[in-house]
Amino acid sequence: MKILLYTHSDYSWVWKYWHQQTDKYLNDYEKICLVNSNSLFKDDYQLIKYDDSKNYRHRILSCLERLNDNDVVLFCHEDMFLYDQPKYSLLQDFTSLILNDKCDTIKLVRAFDNLDKSNIHEKLFKNPEKQLFSIQPTLIKIKTLKYIYKMVPGDNIWEFEANTSKKYLKDLISLCSFSIGVDKKRGKFHYDSSVYPYICTAVIKGKWNYKEYKKELFEIFYNKRFNYFSYYLSRINILKLYSLF
């Protein structure tokens, strides 16, 4: 697979951590970045620049036209970076399923309850018909990604994602990864992914998502395992020191 990243210069403050975590865990993969024309990005990526005046869907489509239809990519946005090592062998298994047309998309996180198991792999479940594609790390062929962005309406990312239903995506075989007894629910809507342990998502309304991922974000920011007891003890000692003055 190749890494296919969509980003915008408005989120350049997030890039440092995307690069840090991707270099750490996905360094050997070929990488492609779709970015607006006023941006500079890391030079080990194939850069494809889009017109900033286009809406979200047409930005993506204009870039996909320059890629090989049969390439399998892991499609991500910039604030969906790893916090731990993925299971590379399972990623390879899933990539082979996409490559051999056993299914069309494999989302690397589960976001719904009461899903039916797929019969093509023990760690794959069927996505519900009301949302067959979402803006989360997903293994997919370029031609399938083009089909989705052409067929699904929506002037912005939220309208687009809300419309990714059976109504527009007929015959799409859409699956998600899930490990029973291992992947725990986080927040109201999704589960952690042991196959691809990433932050889903790191930025909400322009701010870091400390509500759901405080520990993981602190470990990424400080580049070490974070000990909450030591952290709060140091804060208490600092406050005591200030009280002496």
Image: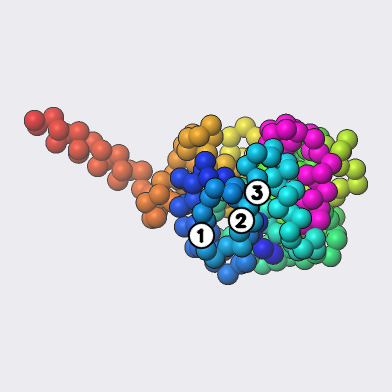
Kind of residue at disc 3 = Tyr
| Quarter occupied by the C terminus | top left
Kind of residue at disc 1 = Lys
| Quarter occupied by the N terminus | bottom right
* Rendered location of residue 156, percent (x, y): 69, 34
Disc on res. 33: 2
Nearest to viewer (mark 2 / mark 3): 3
Labelled pair 3, 1 in contact (Cβ < 8 Å): no
How packed is label 2: few (under 14 Cα within 10 Å), some, or many (20 or more)? many
Q: Earlier in the sequence, mark 2 or mark 1?
A: 2
Q: Secondary structure at mark 2?
A: strand
Q: Is residue 89 visible?
A: yes
Identify residue for label 3.
Answer: 50
Identify residue for label 1.
Answer: 42
Q: Is residue 148 magenta?
A: yes
Kind of residue at disc 2 = Cys
The rendered magenta stretch, by its main secondary structure, is classed as helix
* Magenta stretch in the rendered image: 142-164
